[in-house]
Amino acid sequence: MRVIGVMSGTSYDAIDVAAAELTLRDDTVLLQPLGALSVPFAPDLRERIASSLPPAGTTYAQVCRLDAGLGQAFADAAARGLAELCHGRADLVVSHGQTMYHWVDAGRVHGTLQLGQPAWIADRTGLPVVSDLRSRDVVRGGQGAPLVSIFDVLLLGADARRRAALNLGGIANLTVLDGNPLAYDVGPANALVDAAARELGGDTFDVDGRRAARGTVHEGLLADLLADPYYARPAPKSTGKEHFHWAYLQQRLARREPLPVDDVVATVTELTARVVAAALERHRIDEVFASGGGTRNPWLMQRVAGLAPGCRVRTIADLGLGVDDKEAYAFALLGFLTVHGLAGTVPSCTGATAPAVLGSITPGNGPLRLPPPPASAPGRLLVAAASTY
Ligand SMILES: Nc1ncnc2c1ncn2[C@@H]1O[C@H](COP(=O)(O)OP(=O)(O)O)[C@@H](O)[C@H]1O
Ligand SMILES: [Mg+2]
């Protein structure tokens, strides 16, 4: 089955599209990457996302316009994936949508909202679309995140070393491979770095970690940030930009004398490095495979490696998947599991009471035909044409 995964994370920097040929054979899913694209958001759409995210208020009119605008943007991106990566032939699109709110209360998730009306995608590509993948896990008492955990468990699980997968997007999430795998959002990855670079420095992000490398970590501010009770809360747990946003950082900055921009960026970058490295140490990880835009920040990567000396820090590129594409491939797998009637969650990772078949299916232009459900769920994922296999 040829599947196109369409993903936009909490940084809403670009729509990541990845196409894969997925084959289920006995207990193995074989993933043959067909390629990936990154489609930047139109500046006005990006601005509309930014201006309606918490803590800002919004209106139903804005929500409706955003749902349509995002649906159209995801449809354009999926259509490009279909034409440019699949020679016009694919079976399914899987769309994550844009998270606008992840409703966490006292550690429990009660709802999660991704916008990007899938009807636009189905109509534009003619293909069935799996969307709204998080909700069913939330209904089962899970965090609805990190949903990439099943991908990590299937890909990295069978190994004698203690391995982990780390995604450094807006938020940092970790999957710990273990007999009883664990996955959770560790804390912010780029969320506060981007906020500081944007609000104080007028940049979109801290390009190549240059400000962080130049700046000096302010220990008082760092201690203030590390005092957030989120870090001490037990897993499973998830968070988002409704918690780690500019106003959150601004409140903590207002308690002290003004700091140079580079020092603020250095401090929030160090915050990410500290919480990530502490998690790697706590779980005694031998080897971690990192992905996401944060891997492009050499200062951040160097700090993580320096603070977790017992852990070999690699990237998912070593397993044949691009650092920017991994999550889009992971969502392609989730939708593939859904149309086969297979669960897309690992309860020990999301905290759900039971595994769940994820998502809602929007039919394409033809009748909806689903493949017959296999007798058993796959136990591993192989990426074809990767150097290590
Ligand atoms: N060259 C770079 N230097 C530093 N940071 C980068 C670079 N490229 C990307 N990033 C960071 O990665 C973020 C996007 O990462 P991404 O994995 O797409 O996150 P998300 O999944 O939240 O969209 C950017 O907002 C930025 O903080
Ligand atoms: Mg992104």
Image: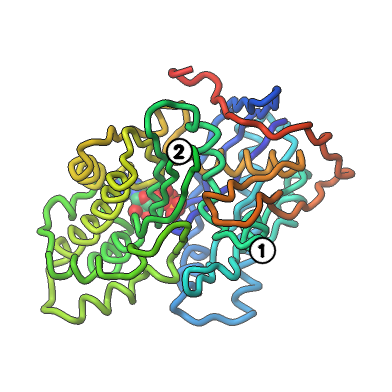
Residue 173 image offset from top left, x and y in percent: 42, 51
Element marked by disc 2: loop
Classify residue 333 by image quadrant. top right
Residue in the picture at 50% in, 58% down: 42
Nearer the observer, disc 2 or disc 1? 2
Q: Which mark is residue 32?
A: none
**Left or right position of 213 against 114:** left
Residue marked by disc 2: 178
**Left or right position of 60 against 103:** right
Q: At label 2, which amino acid type do we have?
A: Asp
Q: Is residue 105 above or below residue 94?
A: below
Residue in the picture at 15% in, 50% down: 213
Classify residue 119 by image quadrant. bottom right
Mark 2 crowdedness (10 Å alpha carbons): few <14, some 14-19, many ≥20: some
Residue 284 image offset from top left, x and y in percent: 31, 40
Residue in the picture at 51% in, 43% down: 327
Image quadrant occupied by the N terminus: top right
Q: Is residue 127 above or below residue 20?
A: below
Classify residue 315 by image quadrant. top left
Residue 165 image offset from top left, x and y in percent: 42, 40
Residue 3 image offset from top left, x and y in percent: 67, 36
Mark 1 crowdedness (10 Å alpha carbons): few <14, some 14-19, many ≥20: some
Q: Are marks 2 and 1 in contact (CB under 8 Å)?
A: no
- Marks 2/1: CA distance? 25 Å
- Ranked by sequence position, the earlier of labels 2 and 1 is 1
Residue marked by disc 1: 139
**Left or right position of 194 against 222:** right
Residue in the picture at 32% in, 60% down: 194
